[in-house]
Amino acid sequence: MTPVRVRIAPSPTGEPHVGTAYTALFNVLLARRLGGEMILRIEDTDQTRSTPDSEQKVMEALRWLGLHWSEGPDKGGPHAPYRQSERRHIYPQYVDKLLHDGHAFKCFCTRERLDVMREEQRRRGEQPKYDGLCLHLTPEEVSAKEAEGIPHVVRMKVPETGECTFEDGVYGTVSIPWASVDMQVLMKADGMPTYHMANVVDDHLMKITHVARGEEWMSSVPKHLLLYRYLGFEPPQFMHLPLLRNPDRTKLSKRRNPTSISYFSSVGYLPEALLNLMGLGFVSIAEGDEVMTLDELAAAFDPGSMAKGGAVFDLQKLDYLNGRWLREKLDEDGFRARLLDWAMMNNRLAGGLELARTRIARLGDLPDLVSFLFRSDLNLTRADFEATKNGAEDSAVVLKAILAMVDTLPEWSREAIEEEVRRIADGMGRKLRVVIPPIFVAMSGSTRSLPLFDSMALLGRSIVRQRLKMALAVLPDAP
Ligand code: GLU
């Protein structure tokens, strides 16, 4: 029998999302259930958005959760390298084969033409997709354009009529009309493959037997199945996982809720509780004890019983489970060890003490000086901002501008934060000291606190983001 191999294939952009943990947990449980291996592959073909920092963070987050892989960029393995940017020499031969066999074509359309085409399609109420103009170029026309040095991408050919029908391990039989499938770009003008091309080639070469990933990839299956067929590869079993949702069924979004794994670790959730909550979506258990370890989840794992409407990511339930894990599942030593690990996370205990030393008069001042670094919630009100010179309305304007930087700053360090806040103040035509008070309040709950930029560095990106969101939630809408 073919050995079972599953994978988690994160794109290292931004902060690791709870959705990545959810997919990884499913894959780990599946591998355990079927007696297989799980591998980690980094999908960094989008070179404009991928960063080494984000890759590092994904691996740290998965390790923190206790979700292990047996092959990956950090571990090596028989199918190394496991980072797609290091595999770029592998893909062109497959693209060439598709071109040679007439399953793909070179497309010379400019961005401007494609924009106009899509705009017109939208106006006609159609789903935007490539209209096939370059599909009809003769070999002579293609050679002439290449000789002229006109850049091109490679697109795949797609049937025009009928449906693509496949068996999904979670959703059962799924049919998607070919008319809704775009002639996907497989190779970009710079020679980098797109996600679709690299993903199919790598899943084949890495001998992946089960592809379990978020539901948002379901609509890509027809393209992928076609590529498997064109390349003469055996397709894996696909399994799509219902999206994580808020209890009111809305999509989990960073705009409204914390979604980064590091937020949950920073405010003191145990990885066991986070896995426990997510894992409850993959098991059918009788009423009774919902507090389950990874081993217990693996024993009860039943992908067929998943609620297709979406798994609920209920923060109240997470609090409940986390409390039970802290109180009942850890012994005294374990509790103390976790508490210390948590306090020292991101250097905030040592860093906080160091900063407090610059302000301290009596040792007993310490809790007041550093407590904001550790609190789950500052319980801010509008009055806290009204008390600043800026007032509530201007505080909102400042904090909104600062929130925008949280996701874009490539490196989260004291220096980088300070430089960026200065730049934002300059852009607003303000002095730094004028924009600082509301940021102080949003971060620490007080106008006098430890040095601001050091504190923001210690709090970490995900807590800073959440505190800014909580502050903006009590303030009037900024323009
Ligand atoms: N790189 C994709 C992601 O980050 C992986 C999708 C897949 O598993 O095929 O979601």
Image (spheres, grey):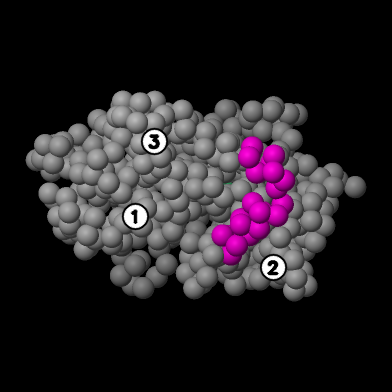
Q: What residue type is labelled 3?
A: Gly
Q: Does the magenta stretch include residue 326?
A: yes
Say if 363 sits above or below 472 in the image: above
Element class at badge 3: helix
Say if 394 sits above or below 165 in the image: above
**Residue 333 lies in quadrant:** top right
Identify residue for label 2.
306
Q: Residues within 10 Å of mark 3 (few under 14, many from 20)?
A: few
Report the residue at 30% width, 70% height from top: 123
**Residue 42 lies in quadrant:** top right
Across and down, in percent, residue 39 comes to 70, 39
> In the image, which residues are magenta?
317-337
Q: Are marks 3 and 1 in contact (CB under 8 Å)?
A: no
The residue mark sitting in front, 1 or 2, is: 1
Report the residue at 31% width, 35% height from top: 450
Report the residue at 77% width, 63% height from top: 302
Determine which of the numbered discs, if any, sits on residue 364 in the image.
3
